[in-house]
Image (tube, rainbow, N blue to C red):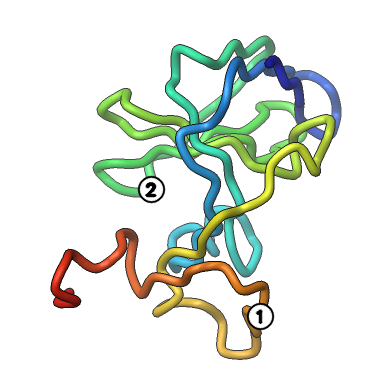
Amino acid sequence: MTREGGCLCGAVRFKAEGEPLNVRVCHCRICQKAMGSPFFARAQFDPRALTIEGEIASYATSAAIERVFCKVCGTRLFSRRTNGTATGVALATFDDRNAFAPTEHIWVSEKLHWLCIDDGLPQYQETLPPPAGGKT
C-alpha cells in the first residue's frame, strides 16, 4: 500500500510504501520542542520505503536524530535516525491523517502534566518496554 502526504504549502510531497515499523506517540521534551506541540505522533518507516519530492532542510536535535521540515513553510515532516535505520513521519502530514493509529505512548515520564492519556494504549516511561522481569 502507498500512502501520500506533504507540507502545509505543498512544496514538499512524500510517498510511504508498505506498512510502518511502528506507530507511536512520543512525549519526550525534545519532540515537544521540535514539534511545538505536547507530543509527536508518528509512523516510523524504513527510509527506503519513503520517496520525498521538494526542498527540505534538517536540524540535528541529538547525535541520533535529525528533524526534517519544509524549507518554504516550515512544516515539521519527519524525524530521521542519523544512522539511517528509520524515519518517523508525522501522522498529521499524511493526506489521510487517519491512515495510522498509534499503538503506544513512549517517554510518558516527560509528558505535560495537564495531558491525560486515557486511550487504553500501553505507556512506557522511556522509549522501550521494560525488559522481561520488570526491571527498567
Residue drawn 45% across and 75% down? 108
Above or below — where is 104 with respect to 53?
below
Residue 123 at what x, y percent from top left?
A: 46, 72
- Say which residue appears at 44% left-offset and 19% top-offset: 47
Badge 1 density bin: few <14, some 14–19, many ≥20, Cα 10 Å: few
Residue 1, image x, y percentages: 68, 16
Tell me: residue 113, above or below residue 66.
Answer: below
Front residue of this view, candidates 121 and 80 = 121
- Is the residue marked by circle 2 packed among few (<14), some (14-19), or many (20+) residues within 10 Å? some
User: Which corner quadrant of the image does residue 82 belong to?
Assistant: top left
For the C terminus, the quadrant is bottom left
Q: Does 85 sit left or right of 97 as displayed?
A: left
Numbered tag placed on residue 13 in the rendering? none
Could you tell me which secondary element the residue under label 1 belongs to?
loop
Name the kind of residue labelled 2 in the image. Thr
Mark 2 or mark 1: whose residue is earlier in sequence: 2
Q: Circle 2 sits on which residue?
A: 61
Location of residue 98 by image quarter? top right
How far across and down, in percent of the image, does residue 66 sit?
41, 38
* Residue lying farthest to the bottom in this orientation: 114
Total number of numbered labels?
A: 2
Name which residue type carries label 1: Asp
Residue on which the image places disc 1: 118
Residue 74 percent coordinates (x, y):
70, 38
Furthest residue in direction front, as rendered: 133
* In contact (CB < 8 Å): disc 2 and disc 1: no
- Circle 2 — which element? loop
Q: Can you tell which quarter of the image residue 19 is in? A: top right
